[in-house]
Image: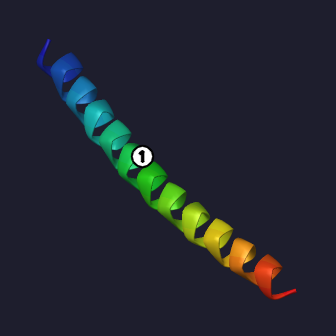
Amino acid sequence: MEAIDHIVQESVQKVKGLDAQSQEISKLVSVIKDIAEQTNLLA
């Protein structure tokens, strides 16, 4: 049972890490989108 608990806890931490990375990617995509919109206004 302890081994299963350890594996589950590691999985939870990895999923939390993926969530944080996904949020950072979303922010980056938003910045790129804003830059693209501004570039289109200049063109």
Residue at x 31% of width, y 42% of height: 16
Residue at x 52% of width, y 55% of height: 26
Q: Check the image and report above or below for 19 versus 2.
A: below
Q: In the rendering, at what x and y percent does residue 35 appear?
A: 66, 78
Describe the colour scheme in one phrase: rainbow
Q: Check the image and report above or below for 43 versus 34.
A: below
Question: Quadrant where the C terminus lies?
Answer: bottom right
Q: Is residue 37 left or right of residue 17?
A: right
Q: Quadrant of residue 12?
A: top left
Q: In the rendering, at what x and y percent does residue 9 appear?
A: 21, 30
Question: Quadrant where the N terminus lies?
Answer: top left
Three-letter code, disc 1: Leu
Q: Is residue 32 left or right of residue 26?
A: right
Q: Check the image and report above or below for 5 versus 25.
A: above
Residue at x 17% of width, y 21% of height: 5
- 19 or 36, which is in the foreground? 36
Q: Residue furthest left?
A: 2
Q: Is residue 1 left or right of residue 23?
A: left
Residue at x 66% of width, y 66% of height: 33
Number of marks in picture: 1
Mark 1: secondary structure: helix
- 35 or 43, which is in the foreground? 43
Q: Residues within 10 Å of mark 1 (few under 14, many from 20)?
A: few
Q: In the rendering, at what x and y percent does residue 30 appear?
A: 57, 63
Q: Is residue 28 left or right of residue 21?
A: right
Name the residue carrying label 1.
18
Q: Residue furthest bottom?
A: 42
